[in-house]
Amino acid sequence: MKIRNTRQRQLILDAVKSLHAKHPTAEEIYSHIESVNPGIGRATVYRNLSFLSEAGHILKIETPIPPDRFDDTLAPHYHMQCRVCGEICDADIEYMRDIESRVKPTDGFIIESHDITFKGICRKCHENIVREDNAE
C-alpha cells in the first residue's frame, strides 16, 4: 500500500533528519518545524510522528528516561542516554543480531527483537559535575 506523503509528513521527516545527532523529542521536532512554518499544529506533528514510526519511515526510541526520541537511522543500532540531562546518542558498537538466540526464554516467551540503551553520564554533564565538585 502506497503511503501518501503530505507536506506535513515531509516537514517532519526533514526535521528528524536535520536534528539527527540530537535524536529529537516530539516537542523538539514540533518547535523546529513551527519556527520555520508557523501555524503547524502540535497535534499534527505528534500524530504524524506516530504514523511515520508505525509505518517504518522513522524509528521511535522508547527510552528509560522520558520523553521518547526519534531517529532517521532505520538500521538496527544501539543508543546511550545520559541519566542527568536525558540526551541520547548512537552507541559505537556493532549490532548483535545473534543475541536473541543466547537468551533462554521461559514460560513459552517468544523473542521477536531487542533494543539496548546504555545509561550513563554524557561528557557535558560529567564536566559540570566535576566543575561543581571542584567549586566546593
Image (spheres, rainbow, N blue to C red):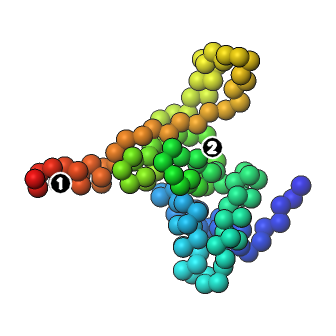
Residue 28 shows in this picture: yes
Residue at the spot 24% in from the left edge and 55% down from the top edge: 128
Q: Is residue 102 above or below residue 21?
A: above
Residue at the spot 74% in from the left edge and 59% down from the top edge: 51
Q: Is residue 117 above or below residue 135?
A: above
Horizontal side of 96 relative to 127 (left or right) equals right
Give the structural element (helix, strand or loop) at label 2: loop
Residue 73 shows in this picture: no
Q: Quadrant of the N terminus?
A: bottom right
Q: Earlier in the sequence, mark 2 or mark 1?
A: 2
Q: Nearer the viewer, residue 61 or 10?
A: 61
Rounded to the nearest angstrom, the CA distance separating label 2 from label 1 is: 39 Å
Most distant residue in the bottom direction:
38
For the image, the number of numbered tags is 2
Location of mark 2 (residue): 75
Residue at the spot 69% in from the left edge and 54% down from the top edge: 53
Most distant residue in the right direction:
1
> In x, y percent, where is residue 21?
48, 57
Q: Is residue 48 above or below residue 129?
A: below
Mark 1 neighbour density, 10 Å: few (under 14) some (14–19) many (20 or more): few
The amino acid type of the residue labelled 2 equals Ala
Q: Which mark is residue 32?
A: none
> In x, y percent, where is residue 61?
58, 48
The amino acid type of the residue labelled 1 equals Glu
Q: Are marks 2 and 1 in contact (CB under 8 Å)?
A: no
Q: Which mark is residue 132?
A: 1
Give the structural element (helix, strand or loop) at label 1: helix
* Viewer-side label of 2, 1: 1
Horizontal side of 42 relative to 86 (left or right) equals right
Residue at the spot 53% in from the left edge and 60% down from the top edge: 24
> In x, y percent, where is residue 83?
39, 46
Mark 2 neighbour density, 10 Å: few (under 14) some (14–19) many (20 or more): few
